[in-house]
Amino acid sequence: MRPKRPYLVRALYDWIVDSDLTPYLLVQVDGSDVVVPQQFVEDGRIVLNISPTAVRALALEDDVVSFSGRFSGQAFNVVVPMRAIAAVYAKESGEGMMFEPEYEPGSQAEVPPASGSDKAADMSGDQRGTDNKERAAHLKVIK
């Protein structure tokens, strides 16, 4: 059976954008194949604003999410394997979905529990704090 995560990520992205909200990705930065600006990674995680006005050339493919964005004024090509996406949610409401960690065979990595200190890095380089307690009430773990 095909993995459901890419389908859910695309569906949630469409739903959030169609609702005129801002789609955020919570990414677990656990390997060299996750290409994000490291200065915005905190506790092994980064929150990315993937709204149409914040990124260019967004590709939500079966195995990877990629786009070009600006961080602190510098262009950066982001590449996130689907397995590294921990959640997709709307910034304004916190509604969305969390995913169970997915590791490649032989990987010993573990995803640390979410804390209230996650920061969102939008494409203009701003960082915005997020409140995981508020968000957790709306997210659902998919196995």
Image: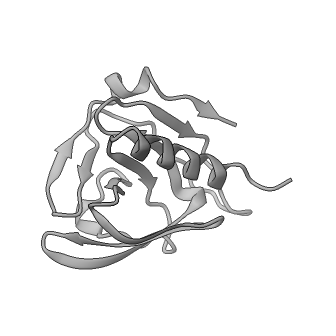
Position above or below: 97 against 65: above
- Report the side of 9 relative to 27 (left or right): right
Residue 88 place in picture, x, y as percent:
47, 44
Please identify the quarter of the rendering in which residue 89 is found. Answer: top left
Residue shown at the point (65%, 51%) measured from the top left: 7
Residue 57 place in picture, x, y as percent:
41, 74
Seen from the viewer's position, the closer of residues 77 and 107 is 77
Number of callouts in the render?
0
Position above or below: 79 against 7: below
Residue 87 place in picture, x, y as percent:
48, 43
Seen from the viewer's position, the closer of residues 20 and 71 is 20
Seen from the viewer's position, the closer of residues 82 and 60 is 60
Q: Quadrant of the C terminus?
A: top right
Residue shown at the point (43%, 20%) measured from the top left: 137
- Report the side of 84 relative to 124 (left or right): right
Residue 84 place in picture, x, y as percent:
53, 57
